[in-house]
Image (cartoon, rainbow, N blue to C red):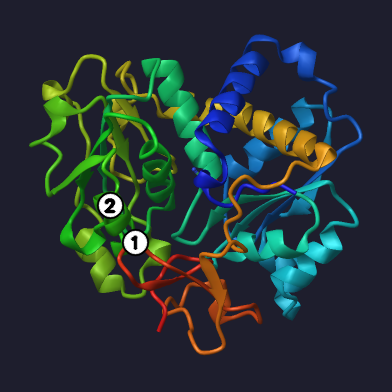
Amino acid sequence: MRHLIDPTDLTVKEIDEILALAEDIIANRAKYSEALKGKKLATLFYEPSTRTRLSFTSAMLELGGQVIGFSDANSSSAFKGETVADTVRVIRCFADIIAMRHYKEGAPLVASQYAGIPVINAGDGSHAHPTQTLTDLLTIKREKGHFDNLTVGFCGDLKFGRTVHSLIKALSRYTGIKVILISPEELRLPDYMLHEMADNSNLEFREVRTMEEVMPELDVLYMTRVQKERFLDDEEFDRVKDSFVLDPEKLLSAKKDMIILHPLPRINEITRSVDNDPRAAYFRQVENGKFVRMALIYTLLKWADENKPFEHTPVFNEEYVISDDLRCGNHSCISTTEDVDHIFRKGSDGMCRCAYCEAKAK
Ligand code: CP
């Protein structure tokens, strides 16, 4: 059974195939209108969403399938204390595939261990958002024509920005990629990501504190929102919330063919006056999200019918250990609140890292 929990669960070749299928769907909409007739998608959203949930819904309906689910954890039996594992063992009786968003990091990975049907991670806490990554990759492909040799600036909340973490992981498998990390000290990329990037000889990266100093170099500027909901301390949020604002003046030094991406929602980090700039690709990006999710649902259900095994098994290969002694040090990890196996892997920095959220063990 194949799931999509992390962008690297798909090989580069498989990602290429999914993007190519999305482009075929865009060009031949009618051909796919009954492709998943009789199939059901369950959207299990424990955290708010506009784009991801509704684009999954729209994607399934446009493939001729049906959708069930909930958009608020409090309207489900999670409110009564039901675990993720038990919930998906129930949902498998009603649906063929699950898209899950959860505020706890690693919840979709737990779901994938119990569901018996494909599980798609639609965003888990601050950790990962692989279908946003497919959306971003399709947008880069359609706007720039290639992935290799691009300089990509990630700006804003790189600490809690799950879309940033997943896109960097995906881009690190192409050649000639330069990543420029633009954030205040408080919102730097998590250390596990920095270690992985330092170990990857494919990838060049550096950290800076202003977007102005790197703007002329960029092929892609990936803006992000500072996520109030992830901060434990309001004062810390207030200190960093207005760190970066992209406006037409800052774009004067940018390349004429640079593209501006943003997973959205935006608050104040891109002024409205940027929206009419042809380089502003963020609303085109949203539409690509529906098509790439159509391609993903179609592919995962086809693989489920073929019983295609994992090429990369994220948890159960010899790199991972189930431990009675170690515990995850991240309070946002699913393993700190639900009764799950405590699974760890030795990271590239020599530290034992939680399989669910990649944080250090304690
Ligand atoms: N990009 C994204 O995940 O948006 P939503 O939170 O609205 O789903």
Secondary structure of the residue carrying numbered label 1 = loop
Q: Is residue 43 left or right of residue 164?
A: right
Residue 224 location (% of width, % of height): 34, 45
Quickly name the residue at label 1: 348
Work out which quarter of the rendered image holds the C terminus and state it: bottom left
Residue 247 location (% of width, % of height): 20, 32
Disc 2 and disc 1 in contact, CB within 8 angstroms: yes
Secondary structure of the residue carrying numbered label 2 = helix
Q: Nearer the viewer, residue 307 or 94?
A: 307
- Give the tally of numbered discs: 2
| Residue 200 visible in the picture | yes
Q: Within 10 Å of the Cα at label 2, are there few (<14), some (14-19), or many (20+) other Cα atoms? A: few
Residue 204 location (% of width, % of height): 21, 40
**Amino acid identity at mark 2:** Asp
**Amino acid identity at mark 1:** Ser
Real-space CA distance between mark 2 and mark 1, rounded to the nearest whole angstrom: 7 Å
Tell me the number on the disc at residue 218.
none
Task: Give the answer, above or below, for where 345 lies relative to 21.
Answer: below
Task: Give the answer, above or below, for where 327 lies relative to 348.
Answer: below
Quickly name the residue at label 2: 199
Q: Nearer the viewer, residue 181 or 355?
A: 355
Q: Within 10 Å of the Cα at label 1, are there few (<14), some (14-19), or many (20+) other Cα atoms? A: some
Q: Residue at x 57, y 88 (%)?
A: 324
Q: Quadrant of residue 149?
A: top left
Mark 2 or 1 closer to N-term? 2
Please identify the residue farthest to the left as the structure is shown: 213
